[in-house]
Image: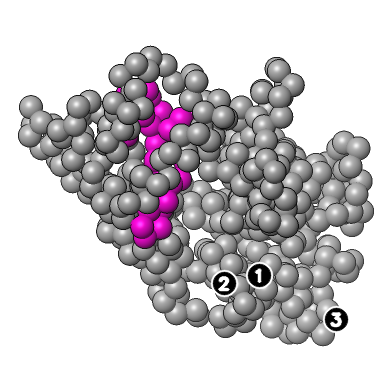
Amino acid sequence: MKELEKTKQTEWAERIRSLDDPATASKKPEALDDLVVLDLSSRSMAGCFCSSLLAELGAETIRIEPPGGDIVRTYSPNGIMHKETGLAYLQEGRNKYHVTLNLETEEGREMLKSLAGQADILIETYPAGTMDVWGIGYDELCKINPRLIFASLTAFGQFGPESGRSQYDYDNVSQARSGIQYATGEILPEGKTFDEMPHAVPTKAGPWIAWATSGAFAAVGILAALFHRTMTGEGQAIDVATPEAYERFNDYGLHWYGDQGVINERFGNLDACLWLYGFYPTQDGGVFLGGLRLEMWKALVDMLGKWDEWGADEWTTLAPFTKKDWQLKYQAMINPLTSQYTSEELTAKSIDYAKSGRLAPITPVVAEIVPPSKTMQDENWQERGIFTPVQDPIYGSIVCAQAQWKATETPPRTKWVCRPVGYDNGFVYLKYLGYGPVRLKELDEKGVI
């Protein structure tokens, strides 16, 4: 029976790969290739991430930056620049045409109106009300183009007590305001001080996860608005506040406080909602151990040789193990045991236990904590094509995460990585405004582009 199941799984893997392998994406149609997107993101990767999702699906996406370029181009570790572009922006400049336009000038705003009149979607990240003050907000542009979908991603939203603050949207501010950062990080043990454990403080997520979250939700909102437009012909405004978007992931923390008044405090790599669920040390680093069922937790105890000593046969429910004092007690008991093995050895033990252990085929989940270098060399991800280098005509061979989902008919794809500041001025302004080289030179000399 197992051999039959294995054969069927292999047949399915081969079948689905033939349908959705990213290597064949360029031969298939693009889902959004009839749409025009204007990305006016300013100082924020949230809007850039949103437009990247649309651009990967084929939308003709025009990235509008101020003359000299947007500051997000400078986001880069150690100030490293590749052809005058920061490494972070190489990830989010994909498939976009790049033009410059000074929206602080009257002529620049009139040009924006002309572009918006021909666009389907506009994405902006200026502080709430900025676009309205300039006369290019939703109320004005929807008169020019009633079908326009106008998406705003801001720090505080378009309404509310703080919406009038002229503060730009910053990822870590949003992480802090969401309530999630409060509960993220190492706990400060009783009797210890921050001087002794300076790392035991609220901790931000490594990447700018809040920006990515609001950008993703904005993209979903845009797609829903497009569906509405096909039925009614009407565009609409979309209002996303980044802290609100990230707060959506606070999960049980919101209910715990809302229902019982309990604040979810920092708990390190443990989780008061789940057990077994955390990271544990090994000889060469660490592993994630997961056992969200009682049997899986028992299997780990058995695998580590503690079945009788810890009385695993008598456990009938996981409930006690979600209590913080129990988790801390067992974490201290597990740490020295996992430290006796390498990550690979622990993974192998879990696989072997699934074959012949007391509770087989039940086994705990074991996953090695790996650095980016190992992730990018992982055969599974290599074969699925996410790290296949993009051969960009300007930036050369660039590795950027691509094809985040596979699809059999209209798959996303990365056609080019990025463009320098204003690289597509000639193409875009000729196509949409009829401006030739002479006119562009005049606009450049006046500081409009």
Q: CB under 8 Å between callouts 1 and 2? A: yes
Q: Position of residue 52 (x, y in %)?
A: 56, 56
The span shown in magenta is 273-300
The residue where tag 1 is placed is 75
Residue 245 appears left or right of 159: left
Residue 435 appears left or right of 347: right
Nearest the camera: 383 or 152? Answer: 383
In reply to whether residue 50 is colored magenta, the answer given is no
> Distance from label 3 to label 2 (Cα)?
31 Å
Q: CB under 8 Å between callouts 1 and 3? A: no
The residue mark sitting in front, 1 or 3, is 1
Quarter of the image containing the N terminus?
top left
Image quadrant where residue 41 sits: bottom right
Q: Which residue is at a point 50% across and 80% down the rendered structure image?
A: 394
Tag on residue 8?
A: none
Disc nearer the start of the sequence (3/2): 2
Quarter of the image containing the C terminus?
bottom right
Disc nearer the start of the sequence (1/3): 1
The residue where tag 2 is placed is 87
The residue where tag 3 is placed is 446
The amino acid sitting under disc 2 is: Leu
Secondary structure of the residue carrying tag 2 is helix
Res. 251 in view:
yes
Res. 219 in view:
no
Q: Position of residue 259 (x, y in %)?
A: 70, 17
